[in-house]
Amino acid sequence: MKKLSARRRHPLAALVVLLFALAVTGGLYAAFAPADKAQADDSAQSLAIEEGKKLYAVGCASCHGTGGQGTSDGPSLVGVGAAAVDFQVGTGRMPAQQPGAQVPRKKNIYSNAQIDQLAAYVASLGAGPTVPDKEQYSPDGADIGKGGELFRTNCAQCHNFTGKGGALTDGKYAPTLEGVDPKHIYEAMETGPQNMPSFGDGSLSKENKKDIIAYLGAVNGDESESPGGLDLGGLGPVSEGLFGYIFGLGTLIVVAIWVAARTTKAKKS
């Protein structure tokens, strides 16, 4: 009887075994699950790069070189980053239809998935600015007044004080910013396309860029008002001066002719 009672299991033994099994299972999951997820992410990224490389070979390599090194017809893409691709291809500027002083905006020919694949491939050639997330360019919580000050200081000399655009030298121009996707405005500040300088976080912080985007949305939005009356397209002193010259000076000439005619008539009578 003593021998049999000695072999009896403790009442808590089953609970201890169960807890041990759960601990081992949890440890194995923690050890292997993240690795599986990381491998899946790496596999998806590798697939995107491969697909992007195919698209690049067809639509980009003739100007930018087979490895993105650049040619006489197009600059190097090494280090421009995914943001530059998302901007240039997303706005239809690339692939370019023909060479010229400046590549205009047009309807893009790639789907969003294809743009992401092209961006992934170009990003693999060298580190550069990444595509911003929505929080970075959303106007929510931005300081519109501060954005106006920053825009007038850094951008208005080319784009006009409300972003209507303007002429530059040698057939170049600063395009209008009205109706441009906020994400593309953010990417343009990050990458400095064509004639535009780049404004990295050292020049304009992420918050500053967000403020500028909010300002442009406020002055060019459907609900924006012109407290000065007729804004003449918001083009500034050129359109205002032309209006004054044509209508103001024209009115003065008409009045002068009328006065002269009345004076002559009065002398004859």
Image: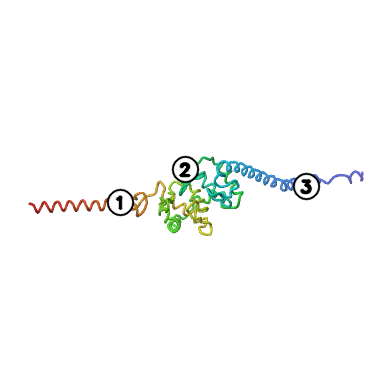
Q: Using residue 40 as the reference point, say whether residue 190 is left or right of it.
A: left
- Farthest residue, direction left: 269
Under circle 2, the secondary element is: loop
Which residue position holds label 2? Answer: 106
Mark nearer the N terminus (1 vs 2) = 2
What amino acid is labelled 1 in the image? Phe
Q: Which is closer to the viewer, label 3 or label 1?
A: 1
Above or below, 55 relative to 239: above
**Residue 113 in view of the camera:** no
| Residues at marks 3 and 1, CA–CA distance in whole angstroms | 86 Å
Q: Are marks 3 and 1 in contact (CB under 8 Å)?
A: no
What amino acid is labelled 2 in the image? Lys
Q: Residue at x 40, y 52 (%)?
A: 167
Between 24 and 12, the residue placed more toward the observer is 24
Question: How many numbered callouts?
Answer: 3
Between 216 and 198, the residue placed more toward the observer is 198
Quadrant of the image containing the N terminus: top right
Under circle 1, the secondary element is: helix
Q: Which is closer to the viewer, label 2 or label 3?
A: 2
Q: Using residue 148 as the reference point, say whether residue 201 is left or right of it.
A: right
Mark nearer the N terminus (2 vs 3) = 3
How is the structure coloured here?
Answer: rainbow
Query: Residue 4 location in percent, x, y?
Result: 90, 43
Mark nearer the N terminus (3 vs 1) = 3
| Residues at marks 1 and 2, CA–CA distance in whole angstroms | 31 Å
Q: Which mark is residue 243?
A: 1
User: Is disc 3 surrounded by few (<14), some (14 to 19) or many (20+) residues within 10 Å?
Assistant: few
Query: Residue 185 location in percent, x, y?
Result: 48, 50
What amino acid is labelled 3 in the image? Phe
Q: Which mark is residue 20?
A: 3
User: Is disc 2 surrounded by few (<14), some (14 to 19) or many (20+) residues within 10 Å?
Assistant: some
